[in-house]
């Protein structure tokens, strides 16, 4: 009886080791993800650990992606004009993946869309030159400046994604934007509940990028 138990224990150890060898590791030691954005990324009006970049660390860990470092480089009020200089500053941290979420303030202020496109393009090119993989987050704005401006604003992100062969998340605030219960009193910034939805929507894009980078 003791001999049978011993054989069973040895068999279970061998089986466990075999399974471990067959399942690819999803450990991403030192892999760094930089979130370059504005107040939506910074988590205006919520606690730092309630902003979607912070929430994503736990969500990724639950999916088996370990040892990641997520860097929140969101600054409230920032436009695409400051993006390149901010990226240059953060390059010292050695990001592997850039989640680019700028442009909302350009649109809300009615700034020139050709300048916005140029700024974002320069950020993408600079990131690519440093070997980063980019995820571009698109944005939607209310039609305050007319239907043409609103439509063309949306198309800037699609055009950039096509021109740079960059993964595009069409709308960062999908399922959150315009929903009172998920936003703060200003109707623009997500509350803690809204950030949870944003994080859940961003998650598949990060997983896709991480798996590709692993290959």
Image: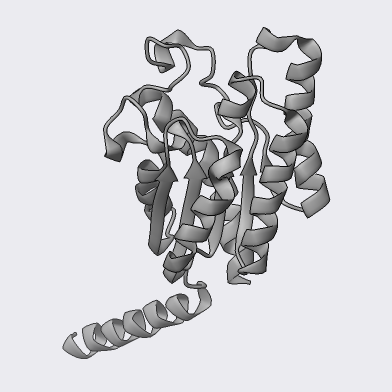
The residue positioned 46% from the left and 12% from the top of the image is: 187
Image height check: is 47 above or below 92? above
Q: Position of residue 206 (x, y in %)?
A: 55, 51
Left or right of 162: which side holds 39? Answer: left
Above or below for 53 versus 175: below
Point out the residue furthest to the bottom here. 3
Q: Is residue 53 above or below residue 106?
A: below
On the question of residue 102 being in view, the answer is yes
Please identify the quadrant where the C terminus is shown.
bottom right
- Report x, y in % for residue 200: 48, 37
Of residues 129 and 62, the one nearer the viewer is: 129
Is 5 located above or below residue 180 in the figure? below
**Occupied quadrant, residue 81:** top right
Instruction: Give the image location of residue 205, x and y in percent.
Output: 59, 47
Q: Residue at x 37, y 24 (%)?
A: 193
Q: Which image quarter is the N terminus in?
A: bottom left
Q: Nearer the viewer, residue 139 or 23?
A: 139
Residue 101 visible: no
User: Which colour scheme appears in the figure?
Assistant: one colour
Quadrant assignment, res 42 = top left
Q: Position of residue 153 (x, y in %)?
A: 73, 26
Which residue is found at the position 73% from the left and 39% from the top?
Answer: 117
Left or right: 82 in relation to 30: right
Q: Is 86 placed left or right of 193 in the picture?
A: right
Residue at x 69%, y 52% (from the top left corner): 122
């Amino acid at each position: 009886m003791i001999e049978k138990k011993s054989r069973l224990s040895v068999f279970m150890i061998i089986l466990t080791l075999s399974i471990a060898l067959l399942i690819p590791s999803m450990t991403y030691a030192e892999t760094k993800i930089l979130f370059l954005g504005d107040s939506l990324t910074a988590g205006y009006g919520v606690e730092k650990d309630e902003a979607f970049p912070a929430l994503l660390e736990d969500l990724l860990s639950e999916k088996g992606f370990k040892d990641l470092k997520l860097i929140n480089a969101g600054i409230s009020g920032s436009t695409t004009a400051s993006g390149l200089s901010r990226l240059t500053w953060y390059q010292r941290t050695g990001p592997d993946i850039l989640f680019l979420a700028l442009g909302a303030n350009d649109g809300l202020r009615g700034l020139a869309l050709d300048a916005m496109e140029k700024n974002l393009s320069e950020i993408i090119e600079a990131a690519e030159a440093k070997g980063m993989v980019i995820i571009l987050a698109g944005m939607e704005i209310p039609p305050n400046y007319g239907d043409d401006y609103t439509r063309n604003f949306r198309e800037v992100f699609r055009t950039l994604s096509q021109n740079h062969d960059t993964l595009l998340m069409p709308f960062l605030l999908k399922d959150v934007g315009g929903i009172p219960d998920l936003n703060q009193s200003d109707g623009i910034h997500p509350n803690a509940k809204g950030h949870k939805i944003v994080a859940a929507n961003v998650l598949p894009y990060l997983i896709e990028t991480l798996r590709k980078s692993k290959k």
